[in-house]
Image (cartoon, helix red, strand yellow):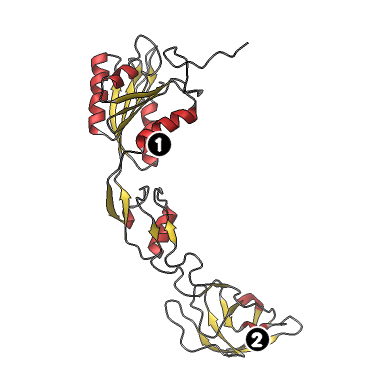
Amino acid sequence: MKPEPLRDMLGREGLTPVSEAQAILFEQLNSIRLATETVPLAEGLDRITSEEITAPENLPPCDRSTMDGFAVVAADTFGASQSLPAYLNVTGEVFMGDKPEGMVSRGNCFKIPTGGIIPDGADAVVMFEHTVPIDEKMIELVKGVGSGSNIIRQGDDICQGSLALSAGRLLRPQDLGLLAGLGISSIVVYRKISVGIISTGDEIVDYTKLPAPGEIRNINTLTIAGQAKRCGAEVIDYGIVSDSEDHFFSTVAKAVIETDLVIFSGGSSVGMRDLGEDAIKRLKPPGVLVHGVALKPGKPVIIGLSDNTPIFGLPG
């Protein structure tokens, strides 16, 4: 026997697979261009970059120590052990925030803190734990290090001119930290889109109220709003709308004019009081793109477009 064909929410053959529904939507969205704006870096959290950001400088800007210890010439430490230690003269000290004065020469070392700039002549750092102080001017080394040990090199995190962040990235706290480290004080991002949310149904009541028999609390608005905000959008709540055609149609039409994207819950399955597809058909073309997706739960989903405003109808 041939399998029953997939049917949409009006009983027509061709319930749309998820991948096809996405392709239909994305094809329509490709022509929509969002405005951009420049904002201070401190206001960049959860904004979306509209262009690539390249590193204007190296990070770190110079070689730095990753340990508290002594900046040394690695060759002076080769073979050092507990039974056969090496001895070095302490001829200088690196202070945080200052460029080191002087140069580390063979047989000598500089005391250095974590994050301190590696002085000229040194090519490794020996941890404090692997040294024994003889006096204020000499240390004993009980473990050797190779060249580059305990050093983060200039540009190790990111090199000047390389890609720091790609376009279309939702900015996280750590992204802002990276940009701050590069000295970037403002960024170009897409203008925040506004999302209009409508909850429909005579049975829906505010979540703060005690439902009467047959009523249910409105949970969709908070859930959808939270997801939209997490994606960097601003939310406009159009409240709970009754199943009245005039009320529902006028609210959807208002939201389409006032926002960049509209989501309504309820009104998407087939029944006498379900109005979602009819509402979209009354708006500007192209109208309904998909009604009914091969998805469970979520089969009655409506995807539409009025001019450049996407509209989504979700089952209540």
User: Residue 11 at x, y = what percent?
Assistant: 44, 12
Q: Amino acid at mark 1?
A: Gln
User: Residue 31 at x, y = what percent?
Assistant: 32, 38
Report helix, strand or loop for mark 2. Answer: helix
Give the answer, above or below, for where 50 lies relative to 119. above
Structural crowding at the residue carrying mark 2, measured as other residues with C-alpha within 10 Å and reported as few (<14), some (14–19) or many (≥20): many
Q: Which residue is mark 2?
A: 76
Question: 144 or 211, which lies in front?
Answer: 144
Is there any visible trace of residue 314 in the rendered image?
no
Sequence order check, earlier mark of 1 and 2: 2
Q: Which residue is mark 1?
A: 227
Quadrant including the N terminus: top right
Residue closest to the far top: 272
Q: Is residue 176 left or right of residue 240?
A: right
Report helix, strand or loop for mark 1. Answer: helix
Q: Is residue 7 left or right of residue 79?
A: left
Q: Amino acid at mark 2?
A: Asp
Give the answer, above or below, for where 258 lies relative to 249. below
